Amino acid sequence: MKLRLAGLVSESIVDGPGLRFTLFLQGCPHRCPGCHNPETHDPAGGSAVAAAELLVQIRAARGIDGVTFSGGEPFMQAAALAGLAEQILLLGLDLVLYSGFTFEELLQRGTTDGPTRRLLQAGTMLVDGPYVEAERDLTLSFRGSRNQRLIDLPASLREGSAVEWALEKGIC
Ligand code: SF4
């Protein structure tokens, strides 16, 4: 299956805990004022890449703790990403998901959309919500504005409501 990619970084320390392989998905409907990546908004932009090709690159990456799906809006390509996410877990890596949707919106969406549900189930941490310029805070870990939360996805799905990530516990 192919997905549209704005770019990738094979070694990142800013897109979640530890050393990460980050995919920036192309296409975003949120149009947050002050967005730092406006070139990722057009769903027809970027380039088409086979998920299988990305998996080869991820498998070849040395020393990474996990993979991050950032954007753009990854959940606009949930159908293409769900299978890749499940393969990443099989490699023993964790998965951080970014979304301009809130956890509650994604949970609701997942009740009728299988790929959204599968992607949430594969995730370790979700960084949720739109970027809000008035809430901008450069001191935050892994996010740009105070409204955005670091969410423990397995615990949140178990509870049926958002459980925030305890940063001091790290990941894995
Ligand atoms: S969700 Fe992210 S990529 Fe999309 S407009 Fe907002 S800040 Fe930009």
Image: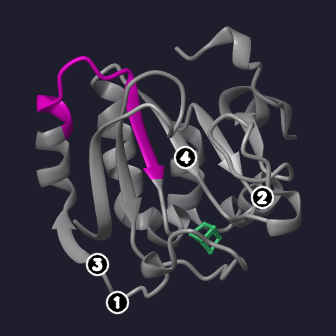
Query: Which residue carries the number 4 mark?
Result: 97
- How far is disc 4 from disc 3 in space, using C-alphas? 19 Å
Cα–Cα span, label 3 and label 1: 7 Å
Which amino acid, mark 3?
Gly
- Residue 131: x, y in percent? 73, 64
Question: Can residue 68 be found in the magenta stretch?
Answer: yes
Whether residue 142 sits left or right of residue 106 in the image: it is left
Figure quarter occupied by ligand 1: bottom right
Q: Which residue is mark 3?
A: 46
How packed mark 3 is, by other alpha carbons closer than 10 Å (few <14, some 14-19, many 20 or more), is some
- Nearest the viewer among 109 and 27 is 27
The residue identified by callout 1 is 44
Looking at the rendered structure, the kind of residue marked 4 is: Leu
- Labels 4 and 3: the sequence-earlier one: 3
Circle 2: residue type: Thr
Q: Secondary structure at mark 2?
A: loop
- Residue type at tag 1: Ala
Instruction: Note whether ligand 1 is within 8 Å of mark 2.
Output: no
